[in-house]
Amino acid sequence: MIKIMLAEDQTLVRGALSALLQLEEDMNVVAEAGDGQNAIALALKTQPDIALIDLELPLLSGLEVVKQLAIQLPTCKTLVVTTFARPGYFKRALEAGASGYLLKDAHIEELTTAIRTVYQGGKILTKELLLQAMREENPLTQRELEILLAARRGLTTKEIAQTLFLSSGTVRNYLSEIMSKLQVQTRQDAIRHAEEKGWL
């Protein structure tokens, strides 16, 4: 029997998914979480074989949950189930330790097959996203991503500088380099572009 945990913040989606999976003879949903922190706590408590994780979870992102479970509960394999067909998210999910990445518009048969494949040690990789991820390397450094994340929170150049212990001039240089790399005119455009690619 494959023990499954669901981490999905939309109650209706979570309930429907749980009901469908319980119809499978070899599957048992042992836990359901509506946020990232609860997902980790429930996983540690119920020890599922597989966790189905949405990327957009409150309190702790799905990517962070994948990362934490890989460290705290390596026996539990993770399968990201999301609406985001973004190569950046796909790549980051795999780097965080996910065994697969499936889009929510997949049929239930695809999901159950994916669960069984992952349970047996296989990987579920969306071919289109894999090709896109290989084609579209994230050009931003870790520091540039930190600055862009701070800008997304609405911080001014001066506030970003204080937060990251840099000079305002250095932050301006970084922002200029980011906009140049992404071929955009404003920091808002840079944030939007990075979000669309799944780099943020």
Image (cartoon, helix red, strand yellow):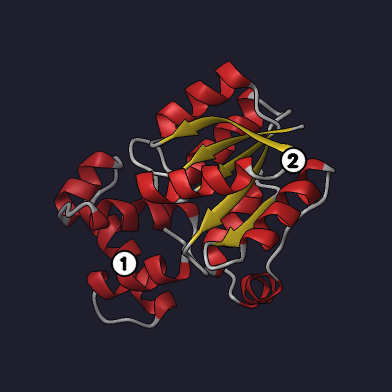
Q: Is 147 placed above or below 49 here?
A: below
Sooner in the amino-acid sequence: mark 2 or mark 1 = 2
* Residue 97, placed above or below residue 185: above
Residue 96 visible in the displayed image: no
- Which mark, by number, is residue 191? 1
For the residue pair 136 and 32, the one nearer the viewer reads as 32
Q: Is residue 148 left or right of residue 78?
A: left
Q: Which residue is mark 2?
A: 25
Circle 2: element type = loop
Residue found at x 42% / y 27%: 38
Quadrant that contains the C terminus: bottom left
User: In the shown orientation, is residue 152 left or right of residue 4?
Assistant: left
Q: Which quadrant would residue 144 be assigned to in this image?
A: bottom left
In the image, residue 38 sits, relative to residue 167, either above or below, namely above
Q: Residues within 10 Å of mark 2 (few under 14, many from 20)?
A: few
Q: Is residue 81 visible?
A: yes
Q: Residue at x 64, y 28 (%)?
A: 71
Mark number displayed over residue 156: none
Residue 146 image position (x, y, % from top left): 38, 50
Residue in the foreground of this view, choosing between 112 and 177: 112
Q: Is the residue under label 1 in contact with that under label 2 (CB below 8 Å)? A: no
Residue occupying the point 82% across, 50% down: 122
In this view, the mark in front (2 or 1): 2
Residue flagged by tag 1: what amino acid is it? Ile
Callout 1: helix, strand or loop?
A: helix
- The percent position of residue 48, horizontal first and vertical second, equals 65, 28
Amino acid at circle 2: Glu
Residue 162: % across, % down: 21, 41
